[in-house]
């Protein structure tokens, strides 16, 4: 026996979430319908309101409820430092784990010509305008250490160098507490090439 049309629609909707397969979606749908209808209504309201009211910051492109996000409007941030990341979740990770006090530029992806994602889709024209304003003195490239992330960092690095602005790349390598024998070869190679003075 299959699901009723409304239950199937709910399951299909839940499957749109990253990492949620058919069984997980079915489990969530049945849980909400059997045990937590108030929770289901709350989720529905929150999703509807967020989809309606959350947009992108005009300056950094991160998710924001206003024209500018709280980071971009803060007078306590160092406007000469600009960290380039792939997604708003990267901003949150840096904010929670480091003492970084500069500003951000969120690409909302990475270069991937096979998927039709080029410089225009990443807003690199807006990044160039921001760099041309003269306020930024250092760009920190914090894209992911994937093939596409490295290509994106290289492309942006060239763009920044052409403007005679300092450009740095976050280090990638052996995780704190990790053991060398369990680290993959690519990560270990990256760590060796990115070594620094002690």
Image: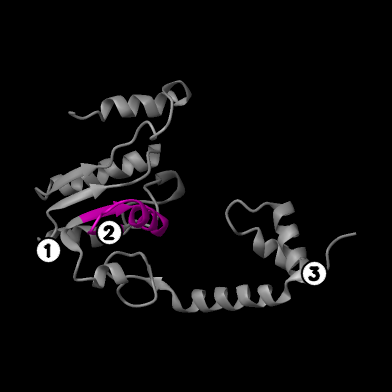
Kindly indicate whether the residue at mark 3 contacts the one at mark 1 (C-beta within 8 angstroms). no
Q: Is residue 131 above or below residue 151?
A: below
For the residue carrying disc 1, how many other residues have a C-alpha within 10 Å: few (<14), some (14-19), or many (20+)?
few
Q: Position of residue 63 (x, y in %)?
A: 39, 67
Location of the C terminus (image quadrant):
top left
The part of the image, by quadrant, that contains residue 106 is bottom left
Q: Earlier in the sequence, mark 1 or mark 3?
A: 3
- In contact (CB < 8 Å): disc 1 and disc 2: no
Percent coordinates x, y for residue 88 in the rendering: 39, 59
* Magenta span: 82-105
Q: Is residue 64 magenta?
A: no
- Where is the N terminus found, in terms of image quarters? bottom right
Helix, strand or loop under label 2? strand
Which disc number belongs to residue 104?
2
Instruction: Name the residue: 59% across, 79% down.
Output: 45
Distance of mark 1 from mark 2, alpha carbons? 15 Å
Which residue is outermost to the top? Answer: 181
Residue matched to label 3: 34
Closer to the chain start, of discs 2 and 3, is 3
Q: In this rendering, would 198 be left or right of 10?
A: left
């Amino acid at each position: 026996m299959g699901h009723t049309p409304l239950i199937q629609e709910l399951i299909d909707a839940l499957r749109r979430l990253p990492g949620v397969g058919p069984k997980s979606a079915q489990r969530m749908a049945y849980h909400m319908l059997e045990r937590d209808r108030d929770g289901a209504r709350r989720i529905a309201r929150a999703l509807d309101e967020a989809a309606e009211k959350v947009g992108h910051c005009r300056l950094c492109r991160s998710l924001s409820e206003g024209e500018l996000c709280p980071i971009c409007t803060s007078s306590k941030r160092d406007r000469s430092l600009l960290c380039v990341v792939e997604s708003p979740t990267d901003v949150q990770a840096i904010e929670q784990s480091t003492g970084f006090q500069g500003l951000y530029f969120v690409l909302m992806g990475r270069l991937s010509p096979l998927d039709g994602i080029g410089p225009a889709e990443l807003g690199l024209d807006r990044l160039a305008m921001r760099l041309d304003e003269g306020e930024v003195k250092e760009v920190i490239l914090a894209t992911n250490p994937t093939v596409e992330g490295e290509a994106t960092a290289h492309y942006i690095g060239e763009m920044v160098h052409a403007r005679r602005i300092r450009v740095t790349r976050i280090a990638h390598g052996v995780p704190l507490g990790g053991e060398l024998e369990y680290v993959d070869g690519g990560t270990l190679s990256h760590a060796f090439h990115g070594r620094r003075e002690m």
